[in-house]
Image (cartoon, rainbow, N blue to C red):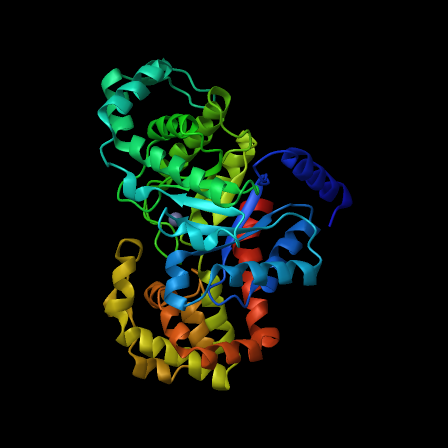
Amino acid sequence: MAQAVKERILTTYFSLNQGSYMTQLSKYSIGVGDRFARQAEAQLAACIAAARVGVEVIPVWNKSHREHTIIGSRPESVRKAADFAVRKLGWTLPYHVDADHIRLDTVDDFIGASDFYTIDVADSIGVPADAAELDAFCRRHGELVGRLSIPGIESEIEIGEADLRLIAGKYLSAAQMAGRIQAHIEEARGGTPFITEVSMDETDSAQTPVELLVILAALADQKVPLQTIAPKFTGRFNKGVDYAGDLPRFEREFIEDLAVVRFAVSQYDLPANLKLSIHSGSDKFSLYGPVRAAIRAADAGIHLKTAGTTWLEEVIGLAEADGKGLALAKEIYTEAFEARQALCAPYATVIDIDPAALPSPADVSSWSAARFTASLRHDQTCPEYNPSLRQLIHVGYKIAAHMGDRYLSLIDRFEAETVARNVTANLFERHIKPLFID
Ligand SMILES: [Zn+2]
């Protein structure tokens, strides 16, 4: 890795953290999920490949309370796997462990293991705030009323008093909840620094750039030193498949969001490195080009959460190994097919599976390794690629969790042969390269 770049990052990292309650998140970071805590090394290898060409992409291992519950794992296992991979591969740059989508009732399990907290306040959006507090917010933020000229946004933004009240009324409770959770984590960690992200993506309607500005003002008031914010962007972010939505509109709003973040940092007491976080649900390949162009033009950072496709690469690796590996991959599909209604229900808003496009388990049983991987691998140029099958297996990790050792022992057996290669190549070639390097 380029020595100069390494020194710069380390110097910045340590100088910014001295005497602060904050750990500094670097400009480019990637959130990776590792459902079964087996792939930290293979994932880190992708960040090492980026560093070798002079681009610092900091790994953040994320796993939510929901995933831990479904799999039966503990947050400490994520920390252990990350620490082990970092030591083994000699990674000397920062890395983090993210308590993904935590709330007040789920955060305590993550206090010892995480140094990055994604405070999820989506449930508090739209909860009516105390009337006096809403009045006070609107009075305090008279600067938001009228015509606003935000550098980076072509036309002036006009916010009327009633608009401000409406937006604040929708988001004030969420900001207050973020403040409560932030204070709770600070106290529980007894002053040990951590990174704060605030997420509002798991909700029905997207937030506009104007709403984002009001939200950031409210979070600053609540003393939430957030370094990343994950709004809900326009369009559908289905699990493990590409973006579905109005791409030009996404691009326009994303550029405006970048401008709003920069403006809010200049106006309010917010960390200077505050950046947007894209909770991609994985594989939003068609967004990478526009996002890359926008962050470069604005000289902005980005946090990209890719979540769960590593699990799919494990299944691809098993299938590629043929024999017992392929047989288990087919068994996972068969069980997922049979349990599809139960598996899909919790993810209903983030998947679009066409039942008619799902092959029958009987058909799949006759498939070769090449046929199986071609259907599952996210290569949109491949005629056999089947997004419905991919989404079903994506949400089907519970099946592998139930298989327990039968699954894990085969992963371990084929890790060096086929699994790790798929995990690393997927992360580097399909995500890191198009977003951060090309
Ligand atoms: Zn999310």
**Do we see residue 202 in this rendering?**
yes
In the rendered image of this protein, does residue 18 appear above or below residue 77? above
Quarter assignment of residue 8: top right
**Do we see residue 284 in this rendering?**
no
Q: Tally the numbered discs.
A: 0
Is 403 left, or right, of 204 in this rendering? right
In the rendered image of this protein, does residue 113 appear above or below residue 216? below
Is 382 left, or right, of 205 in this rendering? right
Q: Residue furthest right?
A: 3
Residue 431 placement (x, y as % from top left): 52, 53
- Write the residue at 51% across / 73% down: 317
Quarter assignment of residue 246: top left
Quarter assignment of residue 182: top left
- Write the residue at 31% across / 30% down: 172
Along the line of sight, the residue nearer the viewer: 351 or 22: 22
Along the line of sight, the residue nearer the viewer: 218 or 423: 218
In the rendered image of this protein, does residue 141 appear above or below residue 89? above
Residue 419 placement (x, y as % from top left): 55, 71
Is 57 left, or right, of 188 in this rendering? right
Along the line of sight, the residue nearer the viewer: 128 or 265: 128
Is 51 left, or right, of 288 in this rendering? right
Residue 383 placement (x, y as % from top left): 40, 66
Residue 42 placement (x, y as % from top left): 59, 64
Along the line of sight, the residue nearer the viewer: 8 or 438: 8
- Write the residue at 41% across / 67% down: 71
